[in-house]
Image (cartoon, helix red, strand yellow):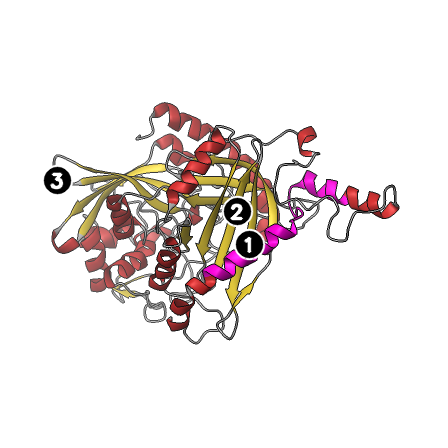
Amino acid sequence: MCQGAKWENRKVRSLRRRKRKTGIVFGALSACIIVIGIVGFQTVERRDVAPKDATQQDVAPQDVTLLQDEAGESGAPGAGSERDETGDRKAEEHWKKGYDLPIGDGEKIEAADECIKIMNLISDIYKSADKGEATNVILSDQTLLAMRDRIKENGDPVCANVSYSSMKNYKQVGRFLKDCKNRKQGTVILYTVHSDGGIGRSKYIFDGTDMYQFDAGAVWNENDQPEMGSMSFTRIKQWNYTEYGWFRYELCVPEYPEVSEMVDGSRLIRVKPMSRENRSMTKKVVAGLGYQGNNLLSSNWDRNHMKDLDYNGLYEYLYEMKFKKKFDEKKYADGIPKDLFETIIMEYLPIKAEHIREYASYDKKSKTYDWVRLGYYNYTLSFFGTSVPEVLKTEKNKNGTYTLTIAAVCEMVLNDDALITHELTIEMGKNGSFKYLGNRIREEVLRELPAYQYRVGRGKEGRRKMGRGKAGHGKG
């Protein structure tokens, strides 16, 4: 495969190790969360900057600028008092745990001033944006990107909560991370435009040994005026600037038995932008598929081996790609008409109608294909399912087809910018059309992935004995 046999063998071994480790996590997680997309396996650990050992972490670094003055907010405490000893113990405990660290007044004021300044910079965009009628405002991608570009003009690194979008002024963050790898002290501030139009301000501080994150943010009130939110100061356990241009790190967070539910401290931020070609291919060809609800990207197949694809699960994703609108669940709850189903499948895959009827769950009497919503009853929980596909490389073959090298990027818990890699072959047609021709994953990696669960079975033998049209529980 594209990463080489040696790299893939390490990946397989690590998949097995992390698959065993995450079994404990799911015992607690599945009891309180019913969602699509969580199963336990983990992958190869890249070479991260290691945290200090236990003895080093007991002492708070003296050159971190966010520390409160020795006197604190209420002046210097009386030496030897019980109150002072209690305060010292609490402060020491915070530094050991690495979260809820004290923040100096100067840093609080500076963060608030800068957040409000940035909010005022984009206030006209927010006020004129379509906010809909819902209580929780969700702005369009176009509006969020306009806000990002406005902040960019201020000279600060900034990104937006828009899939596959680029970080602007990213070189500042890249230089900071490269300096940190060389143990050079420094800071950098990154702004993030959230989906509701508010902004986050993350200040990363490296003291030569440890890295810290100081988070602050601002939101819009009912009168469209900016207001400050909460602030937090946290040590980063481990981090890495990956070969694919991601800033990958894990924050110190409360752990068992201090909390009853798992707290995910993993973060994955794309710093180096994707190439224009790779981003275009990603959004056009694979972004609409993903790794849950269908197995087109998570199985080995080609035009001569298409029996194992989940056509009933795949259909709704191809429908949305073709018509650029949400699949109407109510309209097709009693089945999808044969002609419509087969036409769309054949548009995107090199297969004949008779083979679709043979491989998929099809009702000859009503001449419809079975369909039910994806839910916990027909989907195996997996972290892998939450991954998003990203094209790493685009190659044109001699026969005119294209081979895309794709990484499964997993932000949830596993925190991996290439959980697996695979190669997808496509054929480009006229007017922007395309057809999937095959997908290839190394067998060693494929065996370590969660077993795929078909949406409604496979043909006559695999058909589930469930009422057609009874959607049951939906996605999440």
Q: For this view, does 323 lie left or right of residue 237?
A: left
Task: Look at 16% across and 54% down and name the residue there.
Answer: 432
**Residue 128 vertical position relative to residue 299 in the rendered view, above or below:** below
Q: Earlier in the sequence, mark 2 or mark 1?
A: 1
Q: Residues within 10 Å of mark 3 (few under 14, many from 20)?
A: few
- Residue type marked 3: Gly
Residue pointed to by mark 3: 400
Q: Where does the image place residue 218, in percent across and percent down from the top left? A: 52, 61
Seen from the viewer's position, the closer of residues 463 and 161 is: 161
Image quadrant of residue 3? top left
Residues tagged 2 and 1 counted as in contact (Cβ below 8 A): yes
Please identify the quadrant where the N terminus is shown.
top left
Residue pointed to by mark 1: 111
Q: For this view, does 295 lie left or right of residue 135?
A: left
Task: Look at 19% across and 40% down and name the residue there.
Answer: 402
Regarding residue 218, the answer to whether it shows in the image is: yes
Residue placed farthest to the right in the image? 81
Residue placed farthest to the top in the image? 6
Residues tagged 1 and 3 counted as in contact (Cβ below 8 A): no
Of badges 3 and 2, nearer the viewer stands 2
Q: Which mark is residue 203?
A: 2
Q: Within the magenta stretch, is there residue 111? A: yes
Q: Where does the image place residue 65, in percent across and percent down from the top left? A: 61, 42
**Residue 307 vertical position relative to residue 363 in the rendered view, above or below:** above
Q: CA distance from mark 2 to mark 1?
A: 9 Å
Q: Earlier in the sequence, mark 3 or mark 2?
A: 2
Q: For this view, does 104 lie left or right of residue 199?
A: right
Of badges 1 and 3, nearer the viewer stands 1
